[in-house]
Image: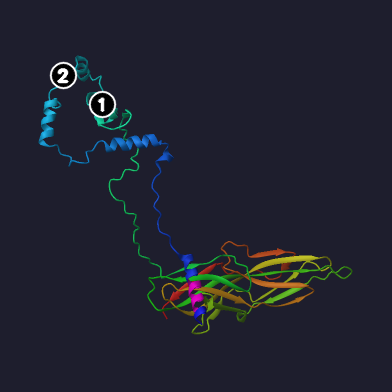
Amino acid sequence: MGDQTTCTTQQNRQNSLVFNIPKVRYTPINPYAFGYTQAQLDMRRKAEILQYNNTSTGKITKKQSWANVIRGSTQRRNFSSYYIKGIQDGTLTPEQICPNDISIPTLTTASDVPGKPMLLYYDASIPLYNYNTENIVYATLNTEEQDKWLIKYDTNVIDDNNQNIFTLSIRQPIDNAVYNYSVTSSIALCIFGYNIAHPGIQDVSGVFNINAPLANFAVSVMYGGQAVTLQNTPTVSFSSGFLQDISGAVSTRLVANAFNGKIYAGNVTFSNIILSTYPGNTYDFFIKYIPSYTISNIDDFNVVIETNVSVGSVKKVENGMRFNTTPSVDTITTFGLQGYIP
């Protein structure tokens, strides 16, 4: 019993991973994608670093202020007559009148940078890359989940007559210990088979008649690969135009003939499915169909169902055979789920 419980829990956890919502991945901008070279990025970073004195607060001391006065950095400067004339007649650009000193190339020796002398320059158009001004916290925003449950289903599923039509995952916002669910799936009946060659006989077409009463459909629920014992038997209902009898014929018996076809039958609904809704529970829902039919002059004949028929699907397909019955007039709804507190 303990091993079975462990396997069930592991299977449920595995099913829950289908509904895992991944976090947003941190993807910084790659400057190399815009054509910048490593030398350009390194130069931009060097120029940024050399603007600041890491040992100061940004304010000069009285001693530094006196040194600037002695060096004459604050004293009146002499300008050439050409420079003065350019200001007067407007031939000098604003940049020439008040040059931005930070953009003027400077030797590394002037900035006390060790190593081989080279020119340093500042280009603001180049992005500042790999320059940390503060610690970056790679956190994710806490978003509150709103859904009480999530579902996953495939469309146009043809497998066997006990098909997984969808998976239900109970989420944290669920507001009650149990819920009553109602599930709807659009159904098509698919046939396939063959006749071997019967030469020398009268070519009589094989005929078939498929009966699709309510008793031929049932629903079951699995949790972690184990069948769930439901509190009551789910009720089965059909759309108003659901096909109850389907008839047709294959093309020939005289020569070998493989045939297949599909006809839209309508929508089937399973109601009154009461389940425990503890957050993290994951359930698989299966539709079981037991075919009931009669055939004449057909060597091999099979019937399966197609669940969750997609909107816009062709309602009738005939290959090597024909249907005497017309498809259901019901609208294809594919899949639907409703839940309410019992």
Considering every residue shown, the one lying at the far bottom of the view is 232
Position of residue 114 measured from the top left corner of the image (x, y, whole percent): 29, 32
Position of residue 70 measured from the top left corner of the image (x, y, whole percent): 11, 26
Residue at 32% of width from left, 31% of height from top? 115
Q: Nearer the viewer, residue 57 or 156?
A: 57
**Which circle's residue, 1 or 2, is located before the other in the chain?**
2
Q: Is 244 colored magenta in this rendering? A: no
- Above or below for 228 versus 140: below
The residue at which mark 2 appears reads as: 78
The residue at which mark 1 appears reads as: 95
Q: Is residue 155 left or right of residue 61?
A: right
Position of residue 293 measured from the top left corner of the image (x, y, whole percent): 70, 77
- Above or below for 238 versus 103: below
Quarter of the image where the C terminus is located: bottom left
Q: Which residues are magenta?
A: 5-12
Q: Is residue 92 left or right of residue 20?
A: left
Q: Is residue 118 left or right of residue 255?
A: left
